[in-house]
Image (cartoon, rainbow, N blue to C red):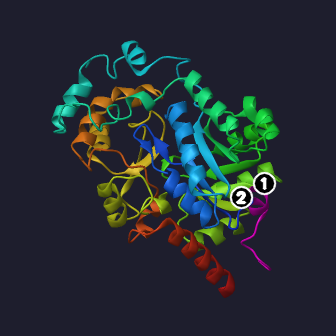
């Protein structure tokens, strides 16, 4: 790699200094990559991305406006477009029509809550207490999120699940770059037909929703399949060595989430940040228990108990709604071993809490050191 190997086509396309993109981390517990973390990454030369999954359009707008006060650099917004969710409906309406997790055990959630020692939720700061009005589950609301992104002409929209094709033309008319996130070559080829500008290929090592295929073999195959569209590598990348490896595999940059979980700016419970620092590469587990889709989390007692009982999981978003009584009670009681914490296998590389700027700077310095030694 000659010249400035860290200045790639991704840098030119997104007007960023370094090919480092913060994964848009968020869920029904709220955003992890909020305005402070996003602005810190963008100000440090990367691209910060807001994690807006399951947030109401009003909350998405609020986060965009806040981020704009903290940085004048490009940033993005990450949302979900899961295809198999209800067309419309509030939490209560969807709950009313939900099937039981186990037909022979209609009270299985309540039974499991008691067995885990989780107190009955009483509102307040729980998953559907504090943010009840900001949690969405339907296609109708997911589409309204995109309307907000387009209205504010956010420089980048990342579609973490589903097909962004219906909004590509309008996004491009507003100079919004569109990122599609995939877990397979087949998915990458579909996004090429949709017209996305950038493809993130996220391997099995990644935290949150991920692939069955390891990053090392997924990235070059996606690169070959979609060239000349730039590919950004995700999954297990947490330092400068990982950045150089991704570039060597043909990627134009990296998509990093777990590396920023242990930062001061991340919206993550203090007990989870401590778990991140204390965990090793063997302290994560892949499960459908939390969202109904395969995802990687720090090991916890809820996931362990669910699998031990041999319980089936419902499709997204029904699984998340089904376990709300457990999550809500655990969240209110600060039960670190029950509240889910998405994290990738590179969690073992995080040894202390840092500022997000320091994470970016150390990744860049580490990459340059590797390049100089080759």
Spot occupied by residue 316 in the image (x, y as percentages of width and height): 48, 29
Vertical placement of 273 versus 334: above or below?
below
**Quarter that holds the C terminus:** bottom right
Assign a secondary structure to mark 2: helix
Vertical placement of 362 versus 142: above or below?
below
Nearer to us in this view, 4 or 101: 4
Q: Is residue 268 left or right of residue 142?
A: left
Spot occupied by residue 261 in the image (x, y as percentages of width and height): 44, 58
The residue wearing badge 1 is: 224
Identify the magenta region. 1-14
Spot occupied by residue 293 in the image (x, y as percentages of width and height): 48, 36
Evaluate whether residue 268 shows in this view: yes
Spot occupied by residue 243 in the image (x, y as percentages of width and height): 62, 68
Q: Is residue 11 magenta?
A: yes
Q: Residue 185 appears in which quarter of the rendering? A: top right
Q: Residues within 10 Å of mark 1 (few under 14, many from 20)?
A: few
Residue sticking out furthest to the top: 97
Residues at marks 1 and 2 touching, judged by CB atoms closer than 8 Å: yes
- The residue shown at (80%, 37%) is 193
């Amino acid at each position: 790699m000659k010249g400035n190997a860290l200045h790639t086509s991704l840098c030119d396309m997104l007007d960023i200094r370094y090919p480092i993109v913060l994964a848009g981390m968020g869920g029904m517990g709220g955003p992890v990559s909020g305005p402070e973390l996003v602005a810190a990454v963008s100000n440090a030369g990367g691209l910060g991305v807001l994690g807006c999954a399951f947030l109401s359009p009003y909350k998405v707008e609020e986060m965009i406006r806040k981020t704009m006060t903290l940085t004048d650099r490009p940033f993005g917004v990450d949302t979900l477009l899961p295809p198999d969710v209800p067309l419309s409906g509030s939490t209560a309406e969807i709950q009313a029509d939900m099937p039981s997790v186990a037909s022979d055990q209609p009270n299985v959630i309540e039974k499991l809550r008691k067995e885990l020692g989780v107190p009955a939720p009483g509102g307040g700061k729980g998953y559907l207490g504090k943010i009840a009005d900001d949690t969405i589950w339907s296609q109708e609301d997911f589409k309204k999120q995109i309307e907000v992104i387009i209205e504010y002409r956010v420089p980048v929209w990342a579609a973490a699940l589903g097909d962004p094709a219906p909004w590509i033309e309008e996004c491009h008319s507003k100079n919004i770059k569109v990122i599609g996130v995939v877990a397979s070559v087949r998915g990458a080829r579909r996004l090429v037909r949709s017209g996305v500008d950038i493809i993130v290929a996220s391997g099995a090592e990644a935290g949150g929703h991920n692939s069955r295929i390891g990053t090392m073999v997924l990235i070059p195959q996606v690169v070959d399949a979609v060239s000349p569209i730039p590919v950004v590598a995700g999954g297990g990348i947490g330092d400068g060595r990982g950045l150089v490896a991704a570039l060597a595999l043909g990627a134009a940059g990296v998509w990093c989430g777990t590396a920023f979980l242990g930062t001061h700016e991340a919206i993550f419970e203090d007990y989870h940040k401590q778990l991140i620092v204390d965990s090793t590469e063997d302290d994560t587990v892949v499960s459908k228990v939390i969202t109904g889709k395969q995802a990687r989390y720090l090991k916890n007692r809820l996931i362990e108990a669910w699998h031990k009982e041999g319980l089936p999981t419902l499709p997204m978003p029904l699984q998340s709604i089904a376990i709300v009584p457990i999550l809500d009670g655990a969240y209110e009681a600060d039960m670190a071993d029950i509240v889910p914490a998405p994290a990738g296998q590179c969690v073992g590389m995080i040894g202390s809490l840092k500022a997000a700027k320091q994470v970016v700077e150390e990744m860049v310095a580490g990459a340059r050191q590797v390049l100089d030694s080759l």
